[in-house]
Image (cartoon, helix red, strand yellow):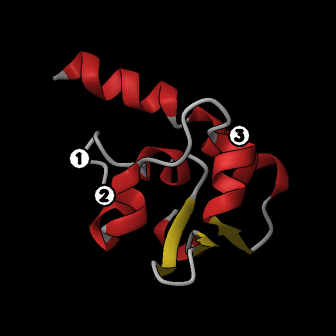
Amino acid sequence: MENLAKERQKKYDSVTHYLTTNGGSQVTLTFTQFDELLFPHSGLPKTARMDVDWWANDYKHPEKGAYGWLNASYQVVQINIEKEYVVFNKLLKSKWLV
């Protein structure tokens, strides 16, 4: 299971890199942009196009893409399967938690 998790982390490194280098406080990406920019060889997984749960902000399910955006300090705040886009917000750290 650990190898699967590491393999998935590596698969979604392109998402982490994109959000880290191009992201502002909010980033909207279409599924087409995911296909072209982030997964040019494989495309966005079919499950991501059909299942809102794939976009959950959850490290516990390595088969999903959360590693990519959570490692870049983003979270999914809106997903629209019909219109094929996802909105990420930058995670803000509270000063009182430091």
Residue at position x 74%, y 74% in the image: 25
Say whether marks 2 and 3 touch (CB < 8 Å). Answer: no
Amino acid carrying label 3: it is His
* Whether label 2 touches label 1, CB < 8 Å: yes
**Residue at left 28%, top 41%?**
63
Residue shown at 33% from the left, 60% from the top: 54
Task: Give the structural element (helix, strand or loop) at label 2.
Answer: loop
Kindly identify the amino acid type of the residue bearing the numbered disc 1.
Answer: His
The residue that label 2 is drawn on is 58
Q: On the rendered structure, is 20 left or right of 88?
A: right
Q: Is residue 98 visible?
A: yes
| Image vertical order of residue 8 relative to residue 94, above or below | above
Amino acid type, mark 2: Asp
Where on the picture, by quarter, is residue 55?
bottom left
Q: Pointer 1 and pointer 3: residues touching (CB < 8 Å)?
A: no
- x%, y% of residue 2? 22, 21
Image coordinates of residue 44 in percent, x first then y, are 52, 48
Say if 78 sits above or below 4 in the image.
Answer: below
Task: Please give the residue where the numbered disc 3 appears in the rendered image.
Answer: 17
Mark 3 closeness class: few <14, some 14–19, many ≥20 residues within 10 Å: some
Q: How many marks?
A: 3
- Is 12 placed left or right of 28 in the picture? left
Marks 2 and 1, Cα distance to the nearest angstrom? 6 Å
Q: Residue at x 28, y 39 (%)?
A: 62
| Residue under label 1 | 61
Residue nearest the viewer, comparing 96 with 64:
64
Decide: few, some or many residues near mark 2? Use Cα within 10 Å; few <14, some 14-19, many ≥20: some
